[in-house]
Image: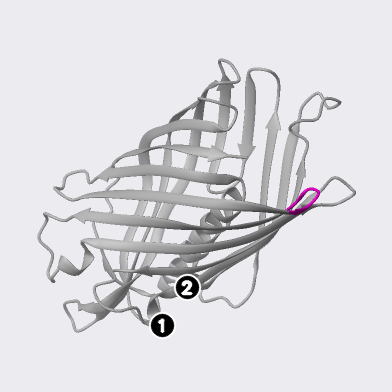
Amino acid sequence: MKYQTVKFFLIFFSIVASKNTFAQLKDLARLEYSYIPKSNSEDSFNRFRGLVNYPIKTSEDCYLIVGGEYSRIAFDIEDNYPFDTSNLNRLHVIDLNVGYTFKLKSGWRFGAKISPRIASTLRHEITGDDFLINGGIYAINDKTKSETINKPYRLILGLTYNSTIGVPLPLPFISYYRRINNQWSYNLGVPKTNVKYFFSEQSILQTFVGIDGYFANIQDGIVIEGGNQAESISLSVVIAGLGYEYCLTNHLIWYAYTGYTINMNNRLRDENREEVYKLDNVNAFYLRTGIKFKI
């Protein structure tokens, strides 16, 4: 049962990564800050994330996209744990993004992306354990700008791969967006399901349920009581809350999401990615804000 629970959360997190993979085909630049203070604890978590992608037009409606993303995850650990926590103060996630997208005669768009990743504490030189690989292929039927459809929509179907889950097979992916009228829209999918209200095309309020998280290698490992050794750390959180977006221009967007975590799993894992220690998992306030430039 324990093994199956671990596999579930890793697979769930892989879908998060795959959804971000698709989103980054459209985001050309992004700066973002996230913060989670721990309830009933002095600990806190914050993350700074930056992304840059550069599209290269190869032919009509065909683009090669190259870029990179960097996340610095910082822990302020004040609580006492039965092991040395200094190795967990900083985590680093570095992605190299290579994607390609083109439009078919049927109107569907095809997209593919591969992202070699370094996810580690990076206290020493990089080893093979610090490397991961993510990627996916997607078929997108985007009718959001159609003038002949009363309720514009976007359907995304795909297959994704994430090396953190240890399953050597691609996983299915689906996401569906529908604009109901001038004021309302909804999106069903992962990592976020939402309902949006449009004050205008520039000012948008939403309610959402979403997930966030990370996975990283711990260089040197951490010896846990009982003789177990932690080789990696993962966090998966389910959040519910409110969000706001303001379009500064047609492509430049400021956004902020605030809410409360309704499920948090923060764990140290062994070399087989099974749980060896559960960190503070008490639900808490969540904040994420940033600015992005998108196609």
Considering every residue shown, the one lying at the far right of the view is 105
The quarter holding residue 15 reads bottom right
Q: Which residue is mark 1?
A: 128
Indicate the quadrant containing the N terminus: top left, top right, bottom left or bottom right.
Answer: bottom left
90 part of magenta stretch: no
Indicate the quadrant containing the C terminus: top left, top right, bottom left or bottom right.
Answer: top right
Measured Cα–Cα span from mark 1 to mark 2: 9 Å
Could you tell me the amino acid type at mark 1?
Gly
Q: Secondary structure at mark 1?
A: helix
Could you tell me the amino acid type at mark 2?
Leu
10 Å neighbourhood of mark 2: few (<14), some, or many (≥20)? some
Q: Is residue 164 above or below residue 53?
A: below
For the point 22% across and 46% down, which residue is it?
38
Q: Secondary structure at mark 2?
A: strand
Q: Is residue 145 above or below residue 34?
A: above
Query: Could you say which is closer to the camera, residue 273 or residue 17?
Result: 17
Q: Residues in magenta?
A: 58-62
